Amino acid sequence: METKYNESTESRPEGGRFMDAPLVNMDLHDFIKQIKSEPTWEKNDRNAITIYKTAGMRIVLIALHEDAVIAKHTANGVLSVQVLEGEIVFSAANQSVVLKKGQMIAVHKDEPHSVAAIKESVFLLTLAA
């Protein structure tokens, strides 16, 4: 297996991180602190970081300011959303569900869905292609 490493960027100049390896350790608390300290968080209604990416699976940590909306879209795989902080409304399949810290949902591939933050929130998105 090839180890994949993400280089530093203008948005994240502090350095890279492993994206794929035989074992990838992910400290969610550190990633939350990181994305909430970046200029993107200050300037926009959200910020996100991909913390794992391999063939068939991606894990993304997403932070939303209160009232931020991710418009209706589809994903090319099965996804799960687990709320780590705050409260969101997740809408899919003609339903809307309020999710709070410790709650999660799963959605099938190509199902249109949207997310709205009731208050400042952080969630973990896992996409399995």
Image (cartoon, rainbow, N blue to C red):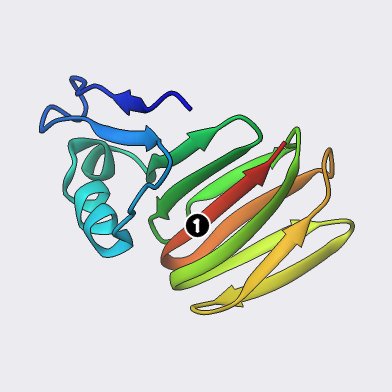
Residue 107, x across and y down, in percent:
78, 55
Front position in the image: 43 or 55:
55
Residue for point 58% across, 57% down: 116
The residue type indicated by label 1 comes to Leu
Report the label total.
1
Residue 109 quadrant: top right
Q: Among all residues in the image, which is located at the extreme right?
A: 94
Q: Quadrant of the C terminus?
A: top right
Disc 1 is placed on an element classified as: strand
Front position in the image: 129 or 122:
129
Front position in the image: 14 or 74:
14
Residue 74 quadrant: top right
Residue 100, x across and y down, in percent:
54, 78
Q: Is residue 35 above or below residue 75?
A: below
Residue 47, x across and y down, in percent:
36, 43
In the figure, is residue 23 to the left or right of 114?
left
In the figure, is residue 63 to the left or right of 82?
left
Q: Is residue 85 above or below residue 25?
A: below
Residue for point 28% across, 57% down: 32
Residue for point 56% across, 52% down: 125
Q: Which residue is mark 1?
A: 124
In the figure, is residue 71 to the left or right of 84?
right
Q: Among all residues in the image, which is located at the extreme front?
A: 1
Q: Pointer 1: residues within 10 angstroms few (<14), some, or many (20+)?
A: many
Residue for point 48% across, 52% down: 68
